[in-house]
Image: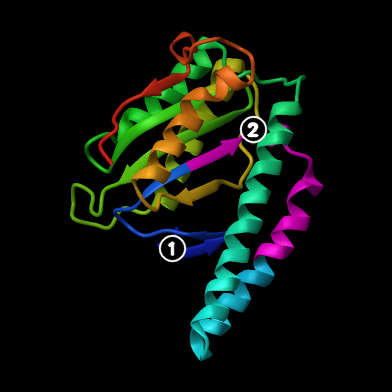
Amino acid sequence: MQKKEHYRNNLPHFQKPGQCYMITWCLKEAVPKHAFKEYSLKLDTLHNQIKELKKTVRSEKQLNETLKNYYSTRKKYIKAFDDLLAMQKEIKTNLAKLPLTQIIINALNYWEGKRLNNHAYCIMPNHVHWVVSMNENDEQGNPVYLQDILHSIKSFTGNQINKHLERNGTLWHKENFETTIRNEKHFMNAVNYTISNPVVAGFVKNHLDWKGTQLVSLNY
């Protein structure tokens, strides 16, 4: 897989070694095929505008306004995505069942201290939220890219869960939603959002009662 600081599936993705992220990904069965198209087109258009403005920018105000529109649209995209996941009541693969939850927890913790540092995660019935910091370099001194870490985790958990359920096929949706954490306030909001997910969904009254939720570190 080519290492890139910018890549795209339906959404454009930006990554740089050493960054902190909040990431969401979901089961393939959780999202209708058409759900990504509208916002994906809007984000793509705004991203192209940003690239062109950076090349020929004459007005910092114009660039900042376009960036503001981009992040506003992306926020709406992620909100619509979260709402879609929350509305889904019937799922074939329930990630909240303990054997499946544990497979994902093991994968999230695998590179701890070597290539990443966990802050918080929550494994919901049809999706995962994760707040994590990437190390700048791995054990061999190579740069650590979020793209590679996610590919490894999704591939491993997909195979293990399929094996446990005695099924075949693609488990995860190919798209991920990651947001680069900008500052400490943003970091705390991301952590609180992550651990409160099962509470907001009405599954438990306290996040500590949800077996798929873990608050690991508040060291931003």
Q: Which residues are magenta?
A: 23-43
Q: Residue sitting at 26 percent across and 48 percent down?
A: 135
Mark 1: amino acid? Gln
Which element is circle 2 on?
Answer: loop
> Which residue is situated farthest in the front direction here?
61
Mark 2: amino acid? Leu
Where is residue 146? Give x, y as percent: 40, 50
The answer to whether residue 9 shows anywhere in this view is: no
Q: Nearer the viewer, residue 115 or 82?
A: 82
Q: Is residue 211 above or below residue 80?
A: above
Res 37 quadrant in image: bottom right
Counting labels gives 2
The answer to whether residue 94 shows anywhere in this view is: yes
Q: Earlier in the sequence, mark 2 or mark 1?
A: 1
Res 86 quadrant in image: top right
Q: Residues within 10 Å of mark 1 (few under 14, many from 20)?
A: few
Where is residue 25? Give x, y as percent: 57, 38
Q: Quadrant of the N terminus?
A: bottom left
Q: Is residue 129 above or below residue 69?
A: above
Which element is circle 1 on?
Answer: loop
Q: Which residue is mark 1?
A: 2
Q: Which residue is mark 2?
A: 27
Tell me the chief SS of the magenta region.
Answer: helix
Q: Is residue 201 above or below residue 141?
A: above
